[in-house]
Amino acid sequence: MEQIRKFLNDFVMLNDEDWNVFSSKLRRVSFPKKTLILEKGKKEKHLSFIEKGIVRFNIPRPDYDFTFAFAFENTFFSAYDAFLTQKPCQYNVEAITDCVLWQISYEELEEVYDATSVGDRMGRKIAEELFLKKTRREMSLLEDTATQRYLDLLSEQPLLIRYIPQKYLASYIGIRPQSLSRIRKAIK
């Protein structure tokens, strides 16, 4: 849990009282590799922090899953649009590796916002971080080459990227696995 406090302290200083309120709401859960954390059509009930593992966001298709995001260790994630609206999610959230998460429910997060002096600011900062990631991703898809998107992901997560299957990486950067093989060969 200290990883979460350290992460949050980069945004807002939590006093012990506020931390105790927030941390008392967290639940530690584990998901084995290739498990759906959230299935398309279900409500997103949790904001999660990844202690260990990698999570993939994908739009399932009969012949091909489109991967549009990853979440890595020491970050918060959720199907945030579905979390905010409490309506069914339009995509899957899947554990690529064995995952250990700390989760807080939508209702409990609202309680934290009301019961702490920095809850609203903390929530806003987490939302801003998620928004910035989404914006960087969209800009990259519009402006960068597939090679550059791969190199960026490699520089952001050099140790963890090796655990992501090539077909997911290729989908994420907007190409087919064969093209990713050529990019990997060209940059070696």
Image: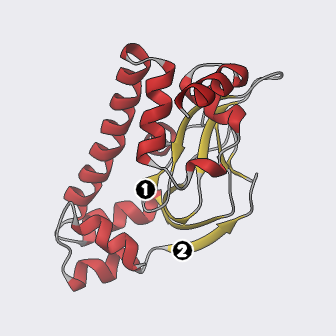
Residue placed most toward the observer, 83 or 101: 101
Residue 177, quarter of the rendered image: top right
Residue in view at x 57 percent, y 25 percent: 186
Amino acid type shown at disc 1: Phe
Residue 117, quarter of the rendered image: bottom left
Question: Would you say 140 lies left or right of 188 here?
Answer: left
Residue 30, quarter of the rendered image: bottom right
- Element at badge 2? strand
Q: Can the viewer see residue 119 in this picture?
A: yes
Residue at the disc numbered 1 = 76
Residue 130 lies, in percent from the top left, at 36, 43
Circle 1 crowding by C-alpha within 10 Å: few under 14, some 14–19, many from 20: many
Amino acid type shown at disc 2: Arg
| Closer to viewer: mark 1 or mark 2 | 1
Residue 168 lies, in percent from the top left, at 67, 35
Residue 67 lies, in percent from the top left, at 62, 31
CA–CA distance in space, label 1 to label 2:
14 Å
Question: Does 81 sit above or below residue 27?
Answer: above
Q: Quadrant of the C terminus?
A: top right
Question: Would you say 83 lies left or right of 56 here?
Answer: left
Residue 155 lies, in percent from the top left, at 42, 44
